[in-house]
Amino acid sequence: MPDLPSLETLLAVITHGSLNAAATELGITQQAASARMRALEATLGVSLLNRSPTGTTPTETGILVSEWADRLLTAADEFDTGLAALRQERRDQLRLAASLTIAEHLLPRWLVSFGRTEHGASASRPKVSFTATNSEHACEMVRAGDVELGFVEGPEVAPGVHSRIVARDTLLLVVPHDHRWARRRTPVTADELARTALVARETGSGTRRFLERQLGRAVGADVGRAQPVLELSTSAAVRSAVIAGAGPAVLSDLAVRDDLGRRLVAVPLADLDLRRALRAVWIGGRHPAAGAAREFLTHVAATRQ
């Protein structure tokens, strides 16, 4: 395939009738214009121009090739314009999806501090929108291109998605003050927890997936698991159900820290490590594409340090 500058030169030569005039329009030397034409004819294997002391005219083949070149260059311009619009869109908007724990307890703080940075406070401040959902759906939105950046709390990320740790939390077993475990002197074992009907998040929740994976590692896959007494779609709903006496729950320390010692009690656990990493996820290269998403992730990572 010929290169676009050579095709552009061909059209300029035919339009102006000389290599010198074409070179002037394109801002190159006549020698460079002539070299482009020789290279183009060699690449295509046909003669495109008739050269004479009085000027340069196209051959019949040159006229045909110039018509094709015009369509190709028009398409290339449209392609470049479209890419420029996409790049501008990436600078002008920031679309996010976050698991509920992150959306409720971390993302607002990150967005406020980002807005105070030089970029966030500038005239080009991006328009931010975000969806609070579970970790599984946040990953799906990233993979579908519905958002530039997601934040998840699951134990792993989907294939083809890049990730970076942006925060950490710990899951806690919590009960109300009148629960029999509230005054327990010995830690609850992983086996006991696996056999206890909990108030749980819905399937697809990163908190639930992480707890189930850790319990599986601790007690084995062959140990019977109790079905949840309730399945709820938000951490706030789970917390409220626990306070109302529906049963114990395992929730992020971020979600219950304001209730500990007041309406909830954290019960010690044995043989179960519930510390976990919270991640940003995106598709593409090792870093999000240049624009607001990359700048926001850089800010979040710096805030964590």
Image (tube, rainbow, N blue to C red):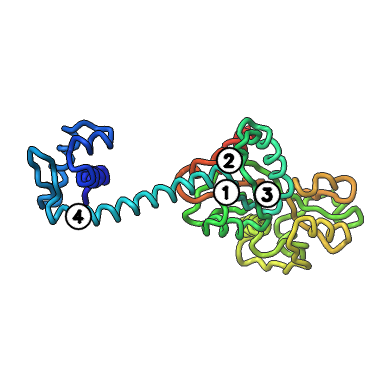
Instruction: Give how far apart the Cα atoms at labels 2 and 4 are.
Output: 48 Å
In x, y percent, where is residue 94?
60, 46
Q: Is residue 174 above or below residue 88?
A: below
In x, y percent, where is residue 195?
73, 64
The answer to whether residue 3 is seen in the rendering is no
Residue under label 2, please give it: 297
Residue at 68 percent of width and 59 percent of height: 208
- For mark 3, does the 10 Å Cα neighbourhood hold few (<14), some (14 to 19), or many (20 or more) residues? some
Residue under label 4, please give it: 65
**Residue 149 marker:** 1
Q: Which-is-in-front pick, marks 3 and 4?
A: 4
- For mark 2, does the 10 Å Cα neighbourhood hold few (<14), some (14 to 19), or many (20 or more) residues? many
Does dot 1 land on a helix, a strand or a loop?
strand
Does dot 2 land on a helix, a strand or a loop?
helix
Considering only order in the chain, which callout, 2 or 3, is on the residue closer to the N terminus?
3
Q: Is residue 181 above or below residue 13?
A: below
Considering only order in the chain, which callout, 4 or 3, is on the residue closer to the N terminus?
4
Q: Which-is-in-front pick, marks 3 and 1?
A: 1
Number of disc labels: 4
Residue under label 3, please give it: 274
The image quadrant that residue 16 belongs to is top left
